[in-house]
Amino acid sequence: MLLAVDCGNTNIVFALYDGETQRGAWRISTDHRRTADEYGVWLTQLMELQGLAPEAVTGAIIASVVPDVIFELKTLIRHYFSCDPLLIGQNGIKLTIPVRLDRPEEVGADRLVNAVAAHHLYTGPLIVIDFGTATTFDVVDADGGYIGGVICPGINLSLEALYMAASKLPGIAITRPQHVIGRSTVPAMQSGIFWGYIGLIEGLVWRIRDEFGTPMKVIGTGGLAPLFKEATSAIEILDGDLTLRGLAMIYAANSKS
């Protein structure tokens, strides 16, 4: 089985794949102080609860946008699963799609992995919206080339900034308000965050399509994607495991070479 690791700024997701079938997935907060042994004890116990033995792991791949945790993740995989992981961004790792940027080394690993998965699963010109710590819009052309995108503050970052900078505003949960016009402070804040992001999504999708010049499918991924897909037709396809599936595809392509 393959251990796929998607390390973001907020959470790390570990998933086991048997071919194209996901056998389990587990999430933990990203913390650069956490050691390989802490990850190992936590992960192997959760695997065993689902009847999955560490010995069944025969390969591993990591995508990380947090350099400080890569060493511990590599150590975890080597010590607890007895294999040497592939790392997205390392020399020699084939992505299976061209990256058509002036400085491809600056692109986050997760964005490239999403582009790989989206192209192979959905084809055609695409916009991939990933609702993570940052909200990213990534553009893939008809033959799979990654041509760039847009990076916006994530919704949780926006909420935190609003709470920290405005002393009279309370902390609030992300929810879909019934009305756009809030009749008190909390509903007004919820409306601004939720419907403001809907406006951002719809506006950027429209502008990207207009600049690109052809129809494009729009795929949503990340934890908050289902909440926003319910409120706008701009997001056509929902795929919560896009990054993990992309990691499995990249590992398979590199294993054959």
Image: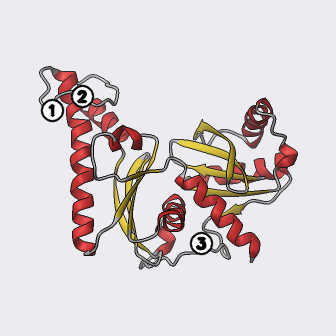
Looking at the rendered structure, the kind of residue marked 1 is Val
Residue 140 in percent (x, y) is at: 42, 70
Image quadrant assignment for residue 249:
bottom right
Please give the label number shown on residue 215.
none
Rounded to the nearest angstrom, the CA distance separating label 2 from label 1 is: 7 Å
Residue 49 in percent (x, y) is at: 77, 29
Per the image, the residue denoted by label 1 is: 180
Per the image, the residue denoted by label 2 is: 177
Task: Check disc 3: other Cα within 10 Å, few if <14, some if 14-19, many if 20+.
Answer: many
Per the image, the residue denoted by label 3 is: 95
Lower sequence index among marks 3 and 1: 3
Residue 15 in percent (x, y) is at: 67, 46
Residue at 75% in and 70% down = 255
Q: Examine the rendered structure and indicate whether residue 195 appears above or below residue 250.
A: above
Rounded to the nearest angstrom, the CA distance separating label 3 from label 1 is: 43 Å
Q: Examine the rendered structure and indicate whether residue 134 appears above or below residue 218.
A: above
Q: Examine the rendered structure and indicate whether residue 13 appears above or below residue 253.
A: above
Residue at 76% in and 33% down = 50
Task: Check disc 1: other Cα within 10 Å, few if <14, some if 14-19, many if 20+.
Answer: some
Rounded to the nearest angstrom, the CA distance separating label 2 from label 3 is: 41 Å
Q: Secondary structure at mark 2?
A: loop
In the displayed structure, does residue 233 sit left or right of residue 180? right
Q: Quadrant of the C terminus?
A: bottom right
Residue at 74% in and 59% down = 85
Lower sequence index among marks 2 and 3: 3
Looking at the rendered structure, the kind of residue marked 3 is Leu
Image quadrant assignment for residue 38:
top right
Nearer to the camera, 35 or 97: 97
In the displayed structure, does residue 144 sit left or right of residue 173? right
Task: Check disc 2: other Cα within 10 Å, few if <14, some if 14-19, many if 20+.
Answer: some
Nearer to the camera, 31 or 57: 57
**Residue 168, can we see it?**
no
